[in-house]
């Protein structure tokens, strides 16, 4: 007997598949991470992330213009300083590279896109950790919160509209929120990197920010084995006042992303990190995969799992591709 239930009826043509697609991505859902470096005269390629660079202020401005033209929702800035020290003093210095870049770009584009900043010490410390160290070499959670508060005020005053708290210190959202409000920055939003795992996928990022890290960050980033803990961290950040919560990395943690999306009453984002980008680019360069299809499929899977927004190094490319199909 021939089947009467034929799901294939809705797969017979590209227009039909497009019509009934359950998951759609809009360019405004995409955020472009960008690296702005001190002491360079021209963009510096990042070898482990083909197509990505450390930017000068001028090249960063050109890239932001491209992102805006493509409809990308925002840009997330990371600073790469020339000089580092134990407490990351360049992170909250008004003339530090991240705050200078933020002011430069926010003044020019702040009414056209959401200028966002990474709020973490790892790029600025000579030991490469995301916080202040004790005499025994351990990350001091509460002393680090004070540094985050100073960074938050500095970034808000530079013009950042959304602060990306990526350090995974306990209590960071509440502490930063209080500091912002006390300084008159009640409207500055907080993106909490709530479920950030101690992943092997961050390797290329270390090159991108000239990381000084030795050892690992397993005492503050989450164990990849733990699913419920990711949800718990997000719930804590929601209670502390996070405006957006995020899961990082994206592709290997779609279960955690779905868990968080099921309970959050604020936007939920995911970060498609440097290793996810590098693996696709490397496999494509060897002719092993269909690059364009895999990029689109990976982003679709992240949004399908529950992400309202995605930080991705392919943001401009994908936004332009989506726009060309519209």
Image (spheres, rainbow, N blue to C red):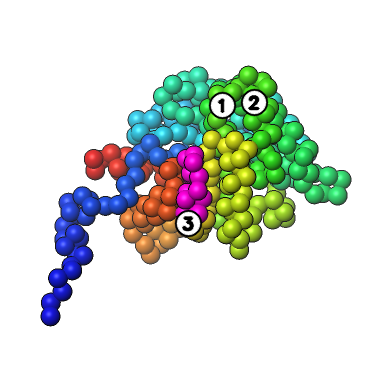
Please state the horizontal and vertical placement of residue 112, each as a whole percent of the image. Answer: 41, 24
Q: Residue at x 73, y 42 (%)?
A: 131
Vertical position of residue 151 compared to residue 294: above or below: above
Q: Earlier in the sequence, mark 3 or mark 2?
A: 2
Q: Residue furthest bottom?
A: 1
Residue 254's mark? 3
Label 1 element class: loop
State yes or no: discs 1 and 3 in contact (Cβ < 8 Å): no
For residue 150, what is the image quadrant?
top right
Q: Earlier in the sequence, mark 1 or mark 3?
A: 1
Q: Residue furthest right?
A: 135
> How far is mark 3 from mark 2, CA to CA?
32 Å
Q: Residue furthest left?
A: 1
Considering depth in this image, is 302 or 159 the residue closer to the camera? 302
Vertical position of residue 180 compared to residue 70: above or below: above
Considering depth in this image, is 282 or 265 the residue closer to the camera? 265
User: For mark 1, does the 10 Å Cα neighbourhood hold few (<14), some (14 to 19), or many (20 or more) residues?
Assistant: many
Considering depth in this image, is 245 or 312 the residue closer to the camera? 245
Q: Which residues are magenta?
A: 257-271
Q: Residue at x 77, y 46 (%)?
A: 139
User: For mark 2, does the 10 Å Cα neighbourhood hold few (<14), some (14 to 19), or many (20 or more) residues?
Assistant: many
Please state the horizontal and vertical placement of residue 276, each as a whole percent of the image. Answer: 49, 54
Considering depth in this image, is 46 or 227 the residue closer to the camera? 227
Vertical position of residue 256 compared to residue 71: above or below: below
> How far is mark 1 from mark 3, CA to CA?
29 Å
State yes or no: discs 2 and 1 in contact (Cβ < 8 Å): yes
Residue 188's mark? 1
> How far is mark 2 from mark 1, CA to CA?
7 Å
Q: Earlier in the sequence, mark 2 or mark 1?
A: 2
> Residue at label 2?
180
């Amino acid at each position: 007997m021939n089947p009467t239930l034929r799901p294939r009826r809705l797969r017979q043509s590209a227009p039909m598949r497009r019509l009934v697609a359950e998951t759609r991505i809009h360019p405004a859902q995409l955020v472009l991470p960008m690296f702005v470096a001190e002491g360079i005269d021209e963009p510096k390629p990042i070898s482990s992330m083909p197509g990505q660079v450390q930017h000068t202020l001028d090249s960063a401005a050109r890239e932001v213009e491209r992102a805006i033209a493509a409809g990308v929702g925002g840009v997330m800035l990371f600073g790469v300083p020339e000089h580092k020290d134990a407490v990351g003093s360049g992170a909250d210095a008004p003339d530090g590279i991240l705050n200078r870049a933020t002011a430069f770009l926010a003044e020019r584009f702040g009414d056209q896109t959401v200028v966002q900043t990474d709020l973490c010490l790892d790029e600025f410390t000579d030991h490469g950790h995301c916080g202040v160290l004790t005499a025994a070499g351990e990350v001091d959670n509460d002393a680090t919160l004070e540094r985050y508060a100073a960074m938050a005020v500095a970034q808000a005053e530079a013009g950042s509209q959304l602060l990306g708290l990526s350090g995974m210190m306990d209590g960071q959202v509440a502490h930063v929120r209080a500091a912002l409000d006390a300084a008159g920055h009640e409207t500055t939003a907080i993106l909490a990197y709530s479920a950030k795992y101690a992943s092997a996928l961050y390797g290329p990022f270390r090159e991108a920010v000239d990381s000084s890290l030795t050892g690992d960050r397993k005492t503050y980033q989450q164990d990849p084995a733990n699913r419920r803990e990711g949800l718990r961290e997000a719930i804590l950040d929601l209670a502390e006042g996070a405006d957006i919560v995020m899961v990082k990395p994206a592709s290997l943690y779609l279960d955690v992303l779905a868990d968080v999306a099921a309970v959050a009453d604020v936007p939920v984002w995911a970060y498609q990190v440097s290793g996810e980008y590098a693996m696709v680019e490397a496999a494509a360069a060897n002719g092993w995969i269909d690059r364009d299809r895999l990029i689109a499929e990976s982003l679709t899977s992240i949004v399908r799992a529950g992400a309202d927004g995605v930080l991705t190094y392919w943001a401009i490319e994908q936004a332009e591709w989506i726009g060309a199909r519209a």
